[in-house]
Amino acid sequence: MKPDEQKTDQKEMEKRRVTPTALKRAVQTVPNGHAGPGIVSTADNKDRKSLYDSYLGSFPKKSFRILDICWAACQHYSELKRWRRGVAKDGSAPDRAFRAMLVSKMSPSDYRKRPRPRGWK
């Protein structure tokens, strides 16, 4: 990795408040016995669901909306649905964004300070 790229990555992590350790945990590879290109194994789907459920369980109910999670991760709701179903590949932009958001254990308003616009989907 070139020094300029490393500085850009460090700035991005500081901007998102993601530690390098959390980022490494967020980007996981597909197991060796994966089902094929574009299809994520069921073990990974369970991992995604458990990560998502544990994140939601760590906050009081009705403290934020699902769209706030999508806004904080800079992804649309349709990408969240694809990610949870396992259609989004490991290491893809939605995968990295949602994993970094959910691993951070920060509320969406703390993760991304800018408020979600009304009517955004």
Image (spheres, rainbow, N blue to C red):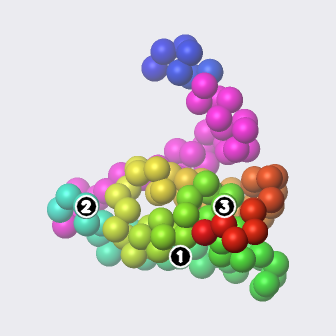
Q: How far apart are the two marked residues, 1 and 2, measured between alpha carbons?
A: 21 Å
Question: What is the quadrant of the C terminus in the image?
Answer: bottom right
Q: Amino acid at mark 2?
A: Gly
Name the front one of labels 1 and 2: 2
Name the front one of labels 2 and 3: 3
Q: Mark 1 or mark 2: which comes first in sequence?
A: 2
The residue singled out by tag 2 in the image is 38
Q: Residue at x 81, y 52 (%)?
A: 113
Expressed as whole percent of the image width and height from the top left, the position of residue 14 reads 72, 36
Question: How many residues crowd around disc 1 within 10 Å: few (fewer than 14), some, or many (20 or more)?
Answer: few
SS for callout 3: helix
- In magenta stretch: residue 107: no
Q: Amino acid at mark 3?
A: Trp
Expressed as whole percent of the image width and height from the top left, the position of residue 31 reads 29, 58
Expressed as whole percent of the image width and height from the top left, the position of residue 54 reads 63, 75
The residue singled out by tag 1 in the image is 50
Q: Is residue 77 above or below residue 21?
A: below
The residue singled out by tag 3 in the image is 71
Q: Are marks 2 and 3 in contact (CB under 8 Å)?
A: no
Q: Residue at x 42, y 70 (%)?
A: 82
Question: How many residues crowd around disc 2 within 10 Å: few (fewer than 14), some, or many (20 or more)?
Answer: few
In this picture, residue 53 sits left or right of residue 65: left
Q: Residue at x 61, y 39 (%)?
A: 20
Q: Mark 2 or mark 3: which comes first in sequence?
A: 2
Expressed as whole percent of the image width and height from the top left, the position of residue 30 reads 31, 56
Extreme residue in the bottom direction: 61
Asked if residue 106 can be seen in this view, the reply is yes
Which segment is the magenta one?
8-35
